[in-house]
Amino acid sequence: MRYQPLALLLVLFAVGCASKDAINVAVKNDTDGPLTIRLIKDKDNWEYFWASPEDQENARVVVMPGRDPGGWADNVPAGKTFSKSNLTGNFKPGEHPVLRVYEGKDLPMKDLLNMTPERGYRVDAPLMIGDNVFVVHSKDGKLSIEAIPQPVAH
């Protein structure tokens, strides 16, 4: 699929104006329906911002009403882009930030916990320091994620 240069430029601008040590994320929803986004850690050293559904379910994180962790988006409509920039965290050796994308919006906890990549209703992608730009597609009822390579700053 070809992407409009102006649209990608806007996404790059949205995530590109950030600290060199920060994580910047942009996720374009190229599916026909809404998506739910979670930015999480892949290990149990929890932080409120990086809380996973498993952290919430196991009471490692208590989500306060009206104060969702910052890496959450419960409704990214088709054709829209979710972005967050200047994200930091306390990552111990072996821990990594991860992007999780779920099919659907305003999903209850039980659905978030039951949606696995193997079932096709969720895709995960590792995040790196710097700009992380993704496009999420859906084909034959399964989500897929495409990482868009970013130019390396010299």
Image (cartoon, rainbow, N blue to C red):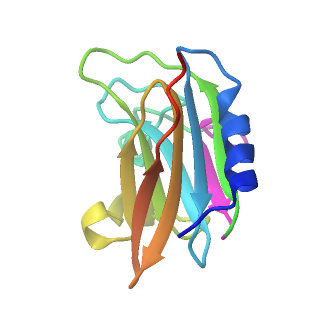
Res 53 visible? yes
Total number of numbered labels? 0
- Where's residue 22, x and y in %? 55, 20
Residue found 53% across the figure and 15% down from its top: 154
Q: Which residues are magenta?
A: 64-78
For residue 88, above or below residue 33: above
* Viewer-nearest residue: 13 or 33: 13
Question: On the picture, is 52 further left or further right than 86?
Answer: left
Question: On the picture, is 73 further left or further right than 115?
Answer: right
Residue found 42% across the figure and 35% down from its top: 127
Residue found 69% across the figure and 61% down from its top: 4
Residue found 54% across the figure and 44% down from its top: 133
**Res. 76 image quadrant:** bottom right
Q: Is residue 62 magenta?
A: no
Q: Is residue 75 magenta?
A: yes
- Where's residue 30, x and y in %? 58, 68
* Viewer-nearest residue: 40 or 145: 145
Res 67 visible? no
Secondary structure mostly seen in the magenta stretch: loop
- Where's residue 55, x and y in %? 39, 39
For residue 56, above or below residue 2: above
- Where's residue 104, x and y in %? 55, 70
